[in-house]
Amino acid sequence: MTAPPAAGAPAVDADDVHRAARRLDGVAHRTPVLTSSTLDAATGARLFLKAEHLQRIGAFKFRGAYNAISSLTPEERARGVVTFSSGNHGQAVARAAALLGVGATVVMPADAPPVKLAATRGYDAEVVTFDRYRDDRHAVAEAVQRERGAVLVPPYDDPTVIAGQGTAALELLEDVDDLDLLVTPVGGGGLLAGCAVAARSREPGIELVGVEPGARHAARNAVAAGHVVEGEIPVTICDGQQSRSIGEHPLAVFVHFGVRVVGVDDDAVRETVRTLALRCKQVVEPSGASALAAVLSGALPVAGRRVGVILSGGNIAPEVLAGILTGAAPDDAERR
């Protein structure tokens, strides 16, 4: 992993994002931008939804994983890669490694959604599980790295990963002019950071906002403090946003560009997943819908503005989706 940046000096710039776009050209899907008159009427805004739930492996994470692994030297690729992930980044590393002929080991929570565990194994990666509430996933991954001599591909705190994620916003802004606001989910911060770099390079005045679960304050606390703040694992339906902290590299970008972060509660996320499925015919996982949930719920007012929103993933367990669609009470199948 690259060393943490000096304060106010992001390690990723627009040139890095453009280089990532060239590596991903013809490999990653150029996902569509969706619009909905129903959602526009509900918010009083013009919404443009970047459909990263339709990306390879069902999430934006493929962009960063492929960019990172394809950037390795032949000697590094021969050693294999290891990562830690709640699910989507693990799938992304597994798939990208398979495409590039690189061995992969993924450290995942034992209670990760079964659909994500099965998909990661289906891409021929070895999965090592851990207890997300008792074990340090980074430490587990580093132990595997030392044992096997593999290269660590972090899920968010790495410049090549961040640059790859930024290509989602680069495409969105190539397809849609004059956005006033860009909203993305924020877990570890890689997507929001990459998108911030890409967006400001094309639209200098665009406002940048990240959305995390209401029960989690890691991103908001870090932005307020100006340094990474570690918290407890939140209990939330948004399993892809349960990290204890954000990364040093993403935070440097947030501070540099004045990125803002807001929270959204699980009920709003659940209603947004339902709306996307029933009105827009799109299956989006809770973490992937959190940015839109902040917009639709009013947690982030947007009336009168042109707003880009990243729908970041679609890997939702069938039983969780069924519960949301039928209005069943939340249980351990969706709250962690």
Image: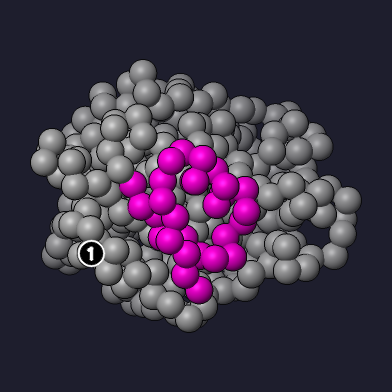
Image position, residue 177 (x, y; %): 45, 25
Q: Is residue 209 above or below residue 98?
A: below
Q: Is residue 17 visible?
A: no
Q: Is residue 191 left or right of residue 293?
A: left
Q: Is residue 187 left or right of residue 7?
A: right
Q: Write down the region rendered in magenta.
A: 104-131
Image position, residue 258 (x, y; %): 34, 57
Viewport quadrant of the C terminus: bottom right
Q: Is residue 336 visible?
A: yes
Depth order, front residue of 51/151:
151
Depth order, front residue of 295/235:
235
In terms of image quadrants, where is residue 85? bottom left
Image position, residue 25 (x, y; %): 33, 21
Residue at 29% across, 31% down: 100
Q: Residues within 10 Å of mark 1 (few under 14, many from 20)?
A: few
Helix, strand or loop at disc 1? Answer: helix
Residue at 70% across, 43% down: 43
Q: Is residue 183 left or right of residue 236?
A: left
Magenta stretch: includes residue 117: yes
In terms of image quadrants, where is residue 16? top left
Q: Is residue 278 above or below residue 173?
A: below
Three-letter code for the amino acid on which mark 1 is drawn: Glu
Viewport quadrant of the N terminus: bottom left
Q: Is residue 157 left or right of residue 31?
A: left
Q: For mark 1, what is the residue? A: 147
How many numbered markers are drawn?
A: 1
Image position, residue 38 (x, y; %): 76, 33
Depth order, front residue of 102/297:
102
